[in-house]
Amino acid sequence: MGISFAITFIGSSAVITHEVSFITDMKVSDTIAASARGITIGIGAISALAAGWLADRLISRYVTIIFLFLVIAGMLILVQADTMSEIWLFVVIYGLGNGVFGTLLPVVTRDIFWYC
């Protein structure tokens, strides 16, 4: 569990760090690229609250898997993106999955060790 969350954190920070550079390489203005990054992080903050709420009501491991699939789908969209509409789709989908793992790590840990 710890290794999977660590890999997720590393991958997430790599994508967020290079998001603006990737978008500006598509000949998009710096302002729009920075706005996309800010919106990605903002959606991630909101979805972190939603993930915590869902994890308290459902099985937290399954909630984690759902958000992990959102992150994977977002990265696949980004890798193939060549238009701004695809970038905005990435921002929404990846934003929903990004940022939730800091919220879900203690909840999943609690659920794993609760029954020991």
Image: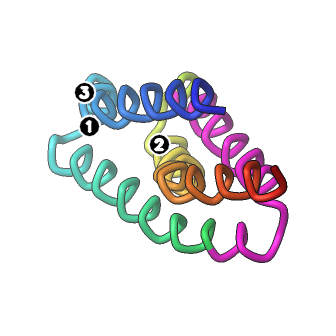
Q: Is 115 left or right of 10, judged from the image as shown?
A: right
Q: Are marks 2 and 1 in contact (CB under 8 Å)?
A: yes
Q: Secondary structure at mark 1?
A: loop
Up/down of 54 relative to 101, above or below: below
Horizontal and vertical percent position of residue 44: 46, 59
- Camera-nearest residue between 94 and 46: 46
Q: Secondary structure at mark 2?
A: helix
Horizontal and vertical percent position of residue 95: 49, 53
Report the Cα–Cα distance between label 2 and label 1.
11 Å
Q: In the image, which residues are magenta?
A: 53-78
Q: In this figure, which residue is indicated by the disc labeled 3?
A: 21
Report the Cα–Cα distance between label 2 and label 3.
13 Å
Up/down of 54 relative to 97, above or below: below
Q: In this figure, which residue is indicated by the disc labeled 1?
A: 28
The kind of residue tagged 2 is Ile
Residue 42 colored magenta?
A: no
Q: In this figure, which residue is indicated by the disc labeled 2?
A: 87
